[in-house]
Amino acid sequence: MSAEISNLYRSLTVVADGMEVTHPELVRRRADRLARIRVAGTAVAVAVLLGGVAVGGRLAFSADGSAPLPPPADTPGPPPTSSTPGPSPSVSPTLSTSQSPTPANSTSGGRPPASATGAAAPRPPTSIPDRAFFRLAAANERGLESWAKSAMLPALCGASYPSDSAVVQRRGRFLAYKKPEQPAESVPDGSYRHTITIYRAGRADDALRELRQAVRDCPTQKLSDDTRTWRQRLLTSGEYGDESVLFEMRSPYPDGMGEPGADEVRLVRAVRIGDVVTVLWEQGWESTTAERAQVDADSRRAVAAIENWLD
């Protein structure tokens, strides 16, 4: 063994001899005391926990076992339940500024309320351009057309139409047509009084309802400029626009005109497209009679022209 290691051992012996070793009994008492401190600390923690649970239970349930209090206003929760009927506390929900929803019926820019699908209803137009009026098929063109302010409908036993108070604008014209097989300069085979009317939002359907009722209320009549008796009745109109009304006016031909025993027939169709109503009133030409196929074809053209305008 080297001299350096021997010196280190001697130094360690001197230090160890100078230290007093603790008695074993004292060591055990210290260990027991530490163990009791740990147990006491654990008991205190358990007591605090149980106390918190008890306080929470008292907040959730009243002393008589009634329904739990509702959750905070901005937190969804289950509905209260109770074994006995009784009033339950109500809490008025509050919303923060950042979470406030826009009211369902609010609009911007003065537009009508949005529908259930979220699409805003379009505003009714306010003026009727020339392009809203249809053109006859080339084979039916006669070249006779003029703008005119005139009655939209024939007289029906003096009927009045309250929906007229909701008219925004009305324009009308007169135009003649010929049958395709007739030469361009031939006498017209018929004519129309054609009008387009814009109503305030939601009132155009009133106009058609009032017209139906007016026809029902006037099965027969004599016109101021005619001694004959005219008969009116509603016909099945078919599908035109959003809804439509078709009726006929029928009377025997005057003596010396038309086929013996035949009737002169006028056809009138009103079609609603949104808040717009167009009317084709077939008036004939020199006692000619209306043909349903011609009126149907021109009604489709009239509807298409208005739909293109509104789009």
Image (spheres, rainbow, N blue to C red):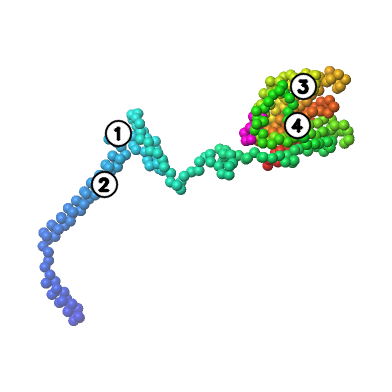
Q: CA distance from mark 3 to mark 4?
A: 17 Å
Q: CA distance from mark 1 to mark 4?
A: 81 Å
Which secondary structure lies at badge 4?
loop
Which mark is in front, 1 or 3? 3
Q: Amino acid at mark 2?
A: Leu
Q: CA distance from mark 4 to mark 2?
A: 92 Å
Which mark is in front, 4 or 2? 4
Q: Amino acid at mark 4?
A: Ser
Q: CA distance from mark 3 to mark 2?
A: 99 Å
Which secondary structure lies at badge 3?
loop
Mark 2 neighbour density, 10 Å: few (under 14) some (14–19) many (20 or more): few
Q: Which residues are magenta?
A: 200-207
Q: Which image quarter: residue 146? A: top right
Residue where numbered disc 3 is placed: 223
Residues marked 1 and 3 touching at CB (< 8 Å)? no
204 drawn magenta: yes
Q: Residue 236: percent from the left, percent from the top?
A: 71, 25
**Quadrant of the snapshot with the C terminus:** top right
Residue drawn 89% across the image and 35% down it: 185
Front-most of residues 39 and 241 = 241
Is residue 158 depicted above or below 200 in this figure?
above
- For this orientation, the residue located farthest to the bottom is 3
Which mark is in front, 1 or 2? 1
**What label does residue 49 carry, if any?**
2
Residue where numbered disc 1 is placed: 65
Which mark is in front, 1 or 4? 4
